């Protein structure tokens, strides 16, 4: 149940949805997200932390940079309903 709550919380802000939509097209750094979204790096870092806690984003170190990518949360079903829901939800995000 806690996993589902984490996913719902992660999806509850427009900024996090915008970040997720960008990460669907490929991995990005905070600096790249900041240039694209035009919001403060600290704000992006906070949203990435919430998305990671919800299992929707994963990170890895590349040299001196942290790179973020979309991930499949453990709360997602095997039939792919969550992925279809997420794709549909992100269609209208600008």
Image (cartoon, rainbow, N blue to C red):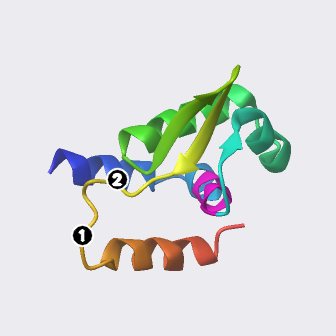
Is residue 60 or residue 42 the one in the foreground? 60
Q: Which mark is residue 77?
A: 1
Q: Position of residue 73 (x, y in %)?
A: 34, 54
Q: Position of residue 37 (x, y in %)?
A: 78, 48
Q: Which residue is mark 2?
A: 7
Indicate which disc, 2 or 1, sits on the residue closer to the N terminus.
Answer: 2
Q: Quadrant of residue 48?
A: top right
- Magenta segment boundaries in residue numbering: 19-24
Q: Disc 2 or disc 1, which is closer to the eye?
A: 1
Is residue 63 or residue 51 the one in the foreground? 63
Q: Residue furthest front?
A: 63
Residue at 34%, 53% in the rendered image: 7
Is residue 32 or residue 16 the one in the foreground? 32
Q: Magenta stretch containing residue 33, yes or no?
A: no
Left or right: 81 as drawn, with respect to 90: left
Q: Is residue 26 above or below residue 43?
A: below
Q: Quadrant of residue 82?
A: bottom left
Could you classify mark 2 by the number of other residues whose Cα lies within 10 Å: few (under 14), some (14-19), or many (20 or more)?
A: many
Residue at 31%, 46% in the rendered image: 6
Residue at 24%, 72% in the rendered image: 78
Q: Secondary structure at mark 1?
A: loop
Q: Secondary structure at mark 2?
A: helix
Q: Residue furthest top?
A: 64
Q: Which mark is residue 53?
A: none
Q: Position of residue 27 (x, y in %)?
A: 65, 49
Left or right: 91 as drawn, with respect to 56: right
Could you classify mark 1 by the number of other residues whose Cα lies within 10 Å: few (under 14), some (14-19), or many (20 or more)?
A: few
All told, the count of numbered labels is: 2
Q: Main secondary structure of the magenta part?
A: helix
Q: Is residue 23 above or below residue 42?
A: below
Q: Is residue 66 above or below residue 21?
A: above
């Amino acid at each position: 149940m806690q996993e589902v709550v984490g996913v719902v919380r992660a999806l509850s802000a427009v900024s996090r949805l915008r970040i997720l939509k960008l990460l669907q097209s490929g991995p990005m750094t905070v600096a790249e997200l900041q240039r694209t979204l035009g919001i403060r790096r600290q704000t992006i870092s906070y949203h990435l932390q919430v998305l990671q806690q919800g299992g929707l984003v994963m990170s890895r170190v590349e040299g001196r940079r942290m790179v973020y990518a979309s991930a499949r949360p453990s709360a997602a079903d095997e039939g792919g309903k969550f992925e279809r829901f997420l794709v549909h939800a992100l269609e209208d995000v600008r």
